[in-house]
Image: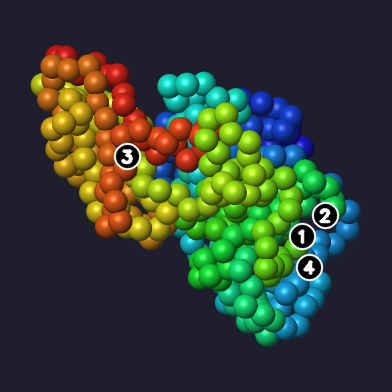
Amino acid sequence: MADKAMTEKDLAVTTVLGVEPLTVETRPAGLAADPTPTEAVFIRNNLGPPAADGPWTVELTGTVSEARLSLEDVFGSLPRHDITMVLQCAGNGRSRLPEPVPGVQWERGAMACVEWSGVLLADLVAAYGGPAEDFAYVTVLGGDAPADDPSRVERSIPAHAALADGLLADRMNGGPLPTIHGGPIRFVMPGYYAVNSVKWVRRIAFTHRESDADIQQRRYRLVPPGGDPGPQHRPVWEMGPVSHILEVHPGTDAVTVEGVAFSGGDPIEAVEVTTDGETWQEAELEPAQSRFAWRRFRANLPAGTGWAAARCRTDRGVQPRHTTPNRDGYAIDGWQELSVRLEV
């Protein structure tokens, strides 16, 4: 499977970081188009695609009418919707942290802006009578491992958020959803880190408590450095505002920087660029394709310095200068302080 997936990637704009499981990062050149071409989208799997063993089914529990659904049951009659959104690994940028932490050493390429197509979770649930009770979570099981395996990929998301924006996707960027990206069915959670967009969906459950799987209880938690991970720590769920400088173009008397900015759903209102950490100039912003897509920015910087950084603002706050330190290097949202040659 890894060999097949690698042949489907454009190796001119991606870098293979690992094979078991396959891990592929996107280079800045691969992020130049919107949506990000499927052959350039990063790959991060915790275990790997399941073996094909007959017709695919999805169990739906916690609804008034519980059911075991075929793909035709899910996608055959409900209205289709498209969502363009940022998909970002929770560890994106980990290699640039001042203090090394274990894990995949991503640069800035564990992100993409992707168009998904499928049916809204809310529409599917409504077709089966809605939630049977006032449940707190939607808990989604992937097909990576058996349902009783502690290492299984099973994530719990607040039910109100999942029902507001969650999508069950079978298409990606206008084509069939590739197996390596979760085909034949993936739960897509806009505005949340990618671990919550569970691949190879096998079960959707309304639950009073979060999953007891290790990936929910101990992993993908914002644990202080040296701390013991557990459910007492905040889960890696919604993304905060962040900006990334992707390209630097030297000119005759100035340098142009280009990049992208996004958040967990709060519209990006402005992106500012600095060369001294104190004085900011506002960048030119392109329109966003949707509430959950990124916005591209561009700014011209004067010559005479060798450093630049960008930050973005939403109506709820400003991107912080420094990421809050945590044990596993998640939710990296500090300024991207970049050494660049700005002298003419």
Please tell me which residue is depicted at 54% across the width and 49% down the height of the picture. Answer: 234
Please tell me which residue is depicted at 53% across the width and 52% down the height of the picture. Answer: 237
Can the viewer see residue 57 in this picture? yes
Residue 289 rendering spot, x and y as whole percentages: 37, 57
Looking at the image, residue 282 sits to the left or right of residue 175; the answer is left
Q: Disc 4 vs disc 2: Cβ atoms closer than 8 Å?
A: no
Residue 188 rendering spot, x and y as whole percentages: 58, 58
Q: Is residue 58 above or below residue 328?
A: below
Dot 1 or dot 4: first in sequence order is 4
Which type of secondary structure does the marked residue at label 4 adopt?
strand
Looking at the image, residue 295 sits to the left or right of residue 140; the answer is left
Q: CA distance from mark 1 to mark 4?
A: 6 Å
Quarter of the image for the N terminus: give it. top right
Give the label on residue 59, or none. Answer: 4
Q: Nearer the viewer, mark 3 or mark 2?
A: 3
Q: Which residue is mark 3?
A: 320
Q: CA distance from mark 3 to mark 2?
A: 39 Å
Q: Amino acid at mark 2?
A: Ala
Q: CA distance from mark 3 to mark 4?
A: 41 Å
Callout 1 crowding tier (Cα within 10 Å): few <14, some 14–19, many ≥20: many
Give the label on residue 147, or none. Answer: 2
Q: Amino acid at mark 4?
A: Glu
Q: Disc 2 vs disc 1: Cβ atoms closer than 8 Å?
A: yes
Q: Amino acid at mark 1?
A: Arg
Dot 1 or dot 3: first in sequence order is 1
Callout 4 crowding tier (Cα within 10 Å): few <14, some 14–19, many ≥20: some
Q: Disc 1 vs disc 4: Cβ atoms closer than 8 Å?
A: yes
Dot 2 or dot 1: first in sequence order is 2
Q: Nearer the viewer, mark 3 or mark 4?
A: 3
Q: Amino acid at mark 3?
A: Pro
Dot 3 or dot 4: first in sequence order is 4
